[in-house]
Amino acid sequence: MLRFIIRRILETIPVLFILATATFFMMRLAPGGPFTSEKQASPAIRERMNAHYGLDKPLFQQYLLQMKHLLQGNLGPSFKYPGHTVNEIIRDSFPVSLELGVESLAVALVFGLVAGMIAAVKRNTAWDHVLMSLAMIGLCVPTFVMGPLLISGFALHLDWFNAAGWFFPRDRVLPALTLGAYYAAYIARLSRGGLLEVLHQDFIRTAQAKGAGPSRVLFKHALRGGLLPVVSFLGPAIAGLLTGSFVVETIFGIPGLGRYFVTAAFNRDYFMIMGSVLFYAVFVVALNLLADIVLVWMNPRLRLE
Amino acid sequence: MPGLLALALCLLILCGCGKRETLVEIGDRTQELFLSNADEPSGLDPQTSIGNIEANIQLALFEGLVTGDPKQNMPRPGVAESWDISPDGKIYTFHLRHNALWSNGDPVTADDFVQSYRRMLMPSLAAQYSYMLYPVTNAEAYNLGKITNFDQVGFKALDDFTLRVTLHSPTPYLLSMMIHQSWYPVPIKTIEKYGALDDEANTWTRPEHFVGNGPFVLKEWRMNSHILVAKSPTYWDAAHVRLNKIYFDPTSSYDTEERMFRSGQLHDTFQASPSKIAYYEKYKPKLIVISPELATYYYKFNVLRPPLNDKRVREALAMSIDRHAITETVSRGGELPAGCLTPPDTAGYTSKTQIREDIPAARKLLAEAGYPGGKGFPTIELLFNTLQSHKAIAEALQEMWRKNLNIDVRLHNEEWKVYLDTMHHTNYDIGRAGWIGDYQDPSTFLDCFTTDSGNNETGWSNLEYDKLCKAASDTGDQSKRFADFQKAEAILMDEMPIIPIYFYTLPRMIRPSVKGFYPNLLDQHNYKYVYLDPKGD
Amino acid sequence: MPETSLQSIAAAETEPSASFWSDAWRRLRKHKLAMFGLGVVIVLSVLCFSQSLISRYILGFNYEQQNLALGAAPPSRLHWLGTDPLGRDLLARLLYGGMISLSVGLAATFVSLVIGVIYGAISGFVGGNLDAAMMRIVDILYALPFTIFVILLMVFFGQNIILLFVAIGAIEWLTMARIVRGQVMSIKQQEFVEAARALGLRKRRILLRHILPNLLGPIIVYATLTVPEVMLLEAFLSFLGLGVQPPQSSWGVLIKEGAEMMEEYPWLLIYPAIVMALTLFSLNFLGDGLRDALDVRTSKD
């Protein structure tokens, strides 16, 4: 187990290196730069701004320089927000996204798993159809519709919440529901499908034949195998949830990290793009590792290779 | 998912219900203004930031020699109590008030201004707005590194409270330019304390370090959450500042800010979507104000590419657009249809040349150019950056040209920076553009289309036009300048490298309790004069 | 070894003959909801793909015809589903958008399904170093900046509907690959696979005949989840300049724009959302039915 984890952590090094290299050259290929703006600065001024950030050096030299800084843990300054470094921006905004992510994840897991299990056990009954229809609606109502709908109902008409902002505990409710609902729908569908698959299998039939009750069958035997697809899905999904959602943060005016993933690209804020990509990558790698460990734990016949 | 609703209900019961006092209601009582400011400012240093988002906050934190009056934003005394102008219009002597203080208690002196302008013009600072100081003798040469001795630049502190500014040629609009943030003083000693003067990453604008000389001081700055400024006790005119606090909200979505406005979290919105404007005008006219803005929405032609290199084709395209239909039914913000580039009554100037909308004449021009009835006209591309409002206008234009001229135009949208890059490289057929004036003078618009202007981007070049713009900037005689501008604009509208569509407006929702917040062309509001009156709501 | 394992080996070892497919079809036909779903999908596809005829002969409006004087109007006898702010008929735009969204949605899902299943199955089945390398590549692809990737695609290849599939397919297969890999790893340890190995069957055969059929459930479920995601992603791509260009429409774009005006002109959101939801429900029922029909084990229930 420990060897497996150490090996995976070592594997992360080439992952981050390749990712950083690919990101560097991709963003430099994209037209426009951090100082491209509607009101053209004079060529002399643009030249000096480029020199200030080292953008006048040959590309490969810039690449080496940035890799060196990354090795030192220095993500560099933000072009868009010159008074702030990328490290600072991530440090300030990540906790917000993390909090929202954990709350949304709780919503998603509780409702998604319960709905999925009920639907699987009561297959082809009204329960199943109603729950799965709700899940389908959750999927076709994207967050940019769900958010405004919830705000319109609960904040504007009923006046139970603020329409946006991130100041009071109650400001967490609507964003967490909006973001969680979407993932809940996914989890509900996946867990139902996975459970159905397992409920047909031999060992379940054996258990049933031995007289185990339905709930015992479900919890003792079926869940382990049936939730494999959910676990595989959750690895990257949680990485996405914890690092923030652009849409939800924009709709609810939340000062999280998620919006930087999109705005940094739009602003060609090179160091911010690199910083956010690597930060996210660490989460993806870590959570996929966790997912793999959970897969093994749920399925003891597997071994960590 | 029914569980979701159940959870929501439980939480609601826990949260407690009932009509709460909204932030706006609290603010009205305590003179705290909740302002929408559209985006996170890129920085608060008035010399290195360029947008109006930043300027809106800096206006609360700094005060220049002159400042804008609340209504028209015309120059009136700021840190300078009074000024004398030499008869030839080239030497301005400013007399500073003795009681003007920085927020750390130091007096604001003439030397502070000189040092600030030295920093503004430092080549290594690379301040984009440094050209705002170019009317001053040798400012441009110093900024471009041609001279290195700042003593040769036309700023001189005669004593602690007298500043002399020498211009290379009379500039009648100098005082209106000086309202701009590039003319604010900055606390040089504080800046030096937190880094090099030319270091953009200097942290002097953080709340814990900040020093300013405006009616308010910076208290809190939480990125993408809010900026809080509070009334400054050291401001010389503090007795007349009525607001205690201003929150600047960086909400970037129209819809979110409108919902926050509706739920009583904001006193105003920065913008409004066309459908909301229509709704508010009809049902809540007291909550919406639409005012003209010093800005033009237009399209640029690439005059180097056939068939647009033919003046007649450009004219035909420009003449066959129904601008009223666009402003009335598409943009719907009460915009004024534009027949020329410079907005009407820009510091008293209105262009006499206006585009005619005449479809038969347009068809005739197109036929003369070799495309009778649109026959043989190649498919050209209309480029715009992705935004719902640009898209709707582009779609309307496409349909108008198809109907009126029987020609086919393809629409092409690009992400913002890709679009800017395409425009800068003049790599388009017809491209959307917009220009917001920096100060109240026609030159801020007409100078864009001189041959060497970085904002021209059309490939169009006319020596007579260049000459007229140059002549207008070299004279102090306002009537001669306006005559030159008239001639220049006539050339522009005859050659038609652009299609003006409309002059922008500023539609904004605002609570009636906000007083002293008058609409003006540059959308600058001197918060010193703003106050809240709960009875007004 | 339980009897059923041998049965499933035997069942899987029979060639998928004509009778297998006709059996599957027979089973599918008995599945009422699946048939309903199939019917709706077919009807919608026919309607959307003949949108130009419908626009011309039945509605009298095409998707780009404007009526600025009318503007946004609620449903009426002339415009059955109302009009947008430029006075364009929503039904015509919905049909046109359906043509785009159905092709993009189904094609991109298919692309991601093929890549994801093959990739995940190989990775999970072979295991070891190959699995590690393949999964680290997936990790890298997850984290690449998608917005920049799309901008580059657009800049270098122009606006091409094929590219849309590539861009969407390129990211949507990742999760599919992870799910398939997890399933394969679990299934390959089970008795019947061990039995097949013991019987000396070749790896390829085991993978194709014994493991893949057991993946059908999760694959079909995840594929039906991918369809709506792809349709909505398309709206984001057209925002970046890739994909449909105005005045064309797609369901994703209609819903996105409708959401911006949902308080003033609710019909602009409601109808596109209903049509899209209907499509997804149908695909979902069809997916469930297919899963049952193709499953060699359930067939014996």
Image (cartoon, rainbow, N blue to C red):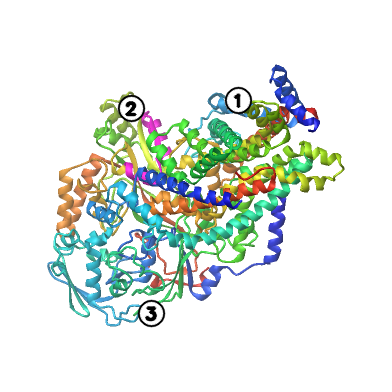
| Horizontal side, residue A207 vs residue B378: left or right | right
| Horizontal side, residue B185 vs residue C46: left or right | left
The subunit letter for the residue under badge 2 reads: B
Is label 2 in a helix, a strand or a loop?
loop
Q: Which of marks 2 and 1 is in front?
A: 1
Magenta range: B394-422
Number of marks in the rendered image: 3
> Is B420 in the magenta?
yes
Of marks 2 and 3, which one's residue comes earlier in the chain? 3
Q: Residue B368, relative to residue B102: is it above or below?
A: above
> Is C206 in the magenta?
no
- Residue located beneath label 3 in the image: B238
Instruction: Find residue B159 and report its image quarter.
Output: bottom left
Q: Residues within 10 Å of mark 1 (few under 14, many from 20)?
A: few
Q: Which residue is drawn at 68% across and 36% down?
A: C187
- How many angstroms separate mark 2 from mark 1 (CA)? 34 Å
| Horizontal side, residue A98 vs residue B479: left or right | right
- Residue located beneath label 2 in the image: B378
Residue A212: where, in percent of width, then height? 85, 45
Q: Which of A62 and B234 is in front in this view?
A: A62
Q: Marks 3 and 1: CB-CB under 8 Å? A: no
Amino acid type, label 1: Val
Q: Is residue A270 visible?
A: yes
- Residue located beneath label 1 in the image: C46
Q: Which of C24 and B275 is in front in this view?
A: C24
